[in-house]
Image: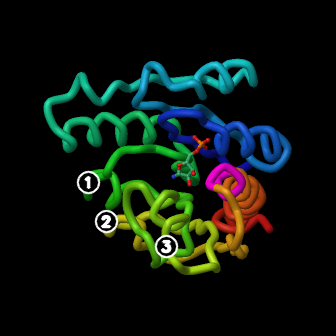
Amino acid sequence: MKRVVILFSKEGSNMENIIKKLHPHKIFVVAVITNNPKARGIAKAKALGINTVILNHKEFDSREKFDEKLVEIITGFDVDLTILAGFMRILTPIFTSRIKAINIHPSLLPAFKGANALKRSYESDQAKVGVSTHFVTDELDGGKIIMQKSFDKSGMSFEEFEKKIHECEHEIYPLSVLKALDLE
Ligand code: GRF
């Protein structure tokens, strides 16, 4: 059984969705890790009986020191893959060079890399929008694409658009996890 760890910072809806769809019959979620002690996802992970680690980035002097501790914890879990699911930290090469990880991003990469992608994608004049999953490298949102799903946002309110983005994310992220682990 392939072992994974999931990292999140806020809602954790992608984390919860992956656990519900894949754990423990397809993959084993060893633990979830959050950098935010107030993340709403903590209660979701606990309700599903998953080991939940809180590593507050504010307790570290630098990104590098935080990443060193994060790498140490992940390495200790002996996982095949690390899944970033709304993990709102920029990762240094200390992490990206040592940890095999995938990420989900709310745009059709390479469009709208980086922060506020959801809003920038909605406000753009491109009708075709969507979500992407990709391998993590030291280039922000720049690694090899695993899957994408697109739709036409014409006529949608921001709320409808946001809901559709999350639906697409919840559809392709579990499939992308299996693909990244050569299980599909
Ligand atoms: C998602 O939109 C994801 O694409 C982005 O952060 C959001 C996380 O949402 N990276 P949730 O915490 O999984 O609900």
Q: Is residue 31 above or below residue 75?
A: above
Q: How far across and down, in percent of the image, does residue 153 sit?
A: 68, 70
Neighbor class of circle 2 (other Cα within 10 Å; few <14, some 14-19, many 20+) is some
Q: Residue at horizontal 80%, vertical 39%?
A: 20
Tell me where residue 32 sits by quadrant. top right
Q: Are marks 1 and 3 in contact (CB under 8 Å)?
A: no
Quadrant for the C terminus in the image: bottom right
* Main SS category, magenta section: helix
Kind of residue indicated by mark 3: Ser
Q: Residue at horizontal 72%, vertical 45%?
A: 18
Say which element carries label 3. Answer: loop
Q: Which residue is mark 3?
A: 124
80, 43: nearer the viewer: 43
Tell me where residue 175 sits by quadrant. bottom right
Which label sits in the foreground, 1 or 3?
A: 3
Residue 138 marker: 2
Confirm whether the magenta stretch covers residue 155. no
Label 2 beta carbon within 8 A of ligand 1: no
Kind of residue indicated by mark 2: Asp
Residue 92 marker: 1
Q: How far across and down, in percent of the image, does residue 180 sit?
A: 64, 66
Q: Is residue 64 above or below residue 106?
A: above
The span picked out in magenta is 158-162
Neighbor class of circle 3 (other Cα within 10 Å; few <14, some 14-19, many 20+) is few
Q: CA distance from mark 3 to mark 2?
A: 27 Å
Residue 4 marker: none
Label 3 beta carbon within 8 A of ligand 1: no
